[in-house]
Amino acid sequence: MDDQSVMVAEAPNITTNKTQLQIMNAFAVNMISISDDIELVWYVARELVSKLGFDDCVVYLIDKDRDLLCQRAAIGKKNPIDNVIVNPMEIPLGEGVTGRVAASREALNLSDLDNCDFYISDIEGAVSEICVPILCEDHLYGVIDCEDIRRNHFKQEHMDLLTFIAALTAAKLQLIQKSRELVESEKRNRLIFNASLDGIITIDVRGNLVECNQAARKMFGFGRNELTGRKFTDLLVPPGFQNRFNEWFDKLSKVAGHRILDTRVETIAQRSNGVEFPVELTVTEYKIEEERFFTGFLRDISAQKQAEAARRKALVEAEKANKTKSEFLATMSHELRTPLNAIIGFSEVLNSQIFGPLGSDRYEEYTNDILMSGRHLLNLVNDILDLSAIEANELSLSKKGFFIKDIVIECSAIISGLAQKKNINYIEDVAEGLSALNADGRAVSQILINLLSNAVKFTPEGGRILLKVSEVGAYHVIKIEDTGHGFPPDKIESLIKPFVRGEDDVLKAQEGTGLGLAIVKSLVDMHEGELVIDSEVGRGTKVIVTLPNGS
């Protein structure tokens, strides 16, 4: 720009005549009733700028999402009819006269556009231009731009008038924006208020219902206009609770920041038909012009309470059924044990031929089968008895101090014979100098027998079983490793449940009820110990039992 005047607007110093004062006064009065930003800028262009002597004016508002100045109102050549703008332009911030004013937030007065290298032509024949930002509290709303065909036309008086008009326009735009945001916020809050699944009621300090949402009306069974203005205790609180509620609310309304505020409590409410039901209630407090209000958020927990009652009933019934099952198993096991002992005793007599030879070798084979089958069945019955006693909490431990090596020797005498039949290499490794173990000796023996029997059962001929006992801190650690087939790690948890056995063919082929590991787990738990099983198909199984030595 060569040899042209560029003025930066300062605080307006307005010298007005009577007509201008009347126009400005009318603007100040009329803009109070304007509630739309587009309506406002058209009013500014037509009723203010035009009447103050400007032949051309375009009001731009900023599009924040796109960083563009958009022409929203105009007079002169840009506005031939009604609210139509000819060739409405969009100017990026920083470009052209209007874009520079918006970016810098400082007014410009250009006296010779022919020598302005950043001017963007909009009005044919224009040679001078004045542009002021629409600013309020450092917030940019747009610009007011005027052009003229006369060179060096705009003076300080024009700058002051436009600056003042822009300031009033910005203040009104801010009010319109805040009012719009408030309306939108109230609309959102009202939608949330009515869409809430929880009941919401608001009462004043006198206990009168001020408003409630649809969920509350549905919860209590009232119509739209049946609640407002009435005492909440008369409508929503059962007669037996009304005195307590009135005392509670009296304290709440007199004491600021009462401890019940913003706290979830359970209480009883009443529907319009008199039916009482449980609710979860949270109360908050707020003020409007020093008047206090209380808002209650209510949730009908009838279904939750019914579900809890059903769960408790189901639990009681399950415990009862489990106890009945255990009692039945125990009774049946006792009833089976008596004839089994007779069968085993008589088959032992026949097998030993105390009263003379049986005659045929087939008889000896049969009596031996009867004896083995009877003993096997007796072992199963004993397992069932043990598990039944554990589940019925009838098995008590008799703890005393003993050296675990003595138990290992007794168990090994039984297991080594079983291992020899399958040519299994059975190895004992009991550490020297172990302290005494304070536990139930019979239970520890049963743990060892069950685990070692399983190891023998699932280890193929020519395999290896290692029993290792050590002491770590205040615990005795028993490890049993075998070179059996093993089983998938994801089946470990199920295998320690009663009557569950492995699903692999190698496991299905074995005898037993699947109670051995369940009994071991129960006995270990009764000693406050730990049972860990590590196994993998083809790699064998390692079982670790950790028992507190009780020292």
Image (cartoon, rainbow, N blue to C red):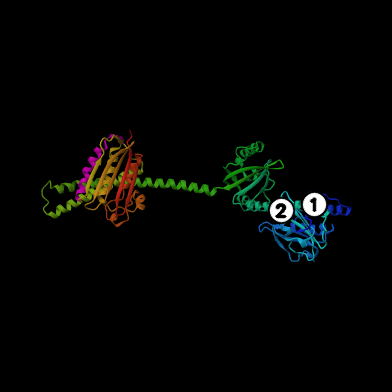
Magenta highlight range: 398-421
Mark 1 or mark 2, whichever is nearer to me: 2
Say which amino acid is labelled 1.
Answer: Phe
* Element assignment for label 2: helix
Identified by mark 2, the residue type is Ser
Q: Is residue 524 left or right of residue 119?
A: left
Q: Is residue 453 visible?
A: yes
Asked whether 30 or 275 is in front, the reply is: 30
Task: Look at the image and tell me in which quarter the C terminus lies.
Answer: top left
Q: Would residue 159 be counted in the magenta stretch?
A: no
Q: Position of residue 271 (x, y in %)?
A: 61, 48
On residue 104, the disc is 2
**Residue 202, percent from left and from top:** 66, 46
Q: Quadrant of residue 402?
A: top left
Marks 1 and 2 in Cβ contact (< 8 Å): no
State which quarter of the image contains the N terminus. bottom right
State the residue position of label 1.
164
Near-viewer residue (88 or 405): 88
Q: Residues within 10 Å of mark 2 (few under 14, many from 20)?
A: few
Q: Specify the label residue 61 is tagged with.
A: none
* N-terminal-most mark, 1 or 2: 2
269 relative position to 386: left or right: right
User: Residue at horizontal 73%, vertical 58%?
Assistant: 98
Residue nearest the viewer, comparing 329 with 57? 57
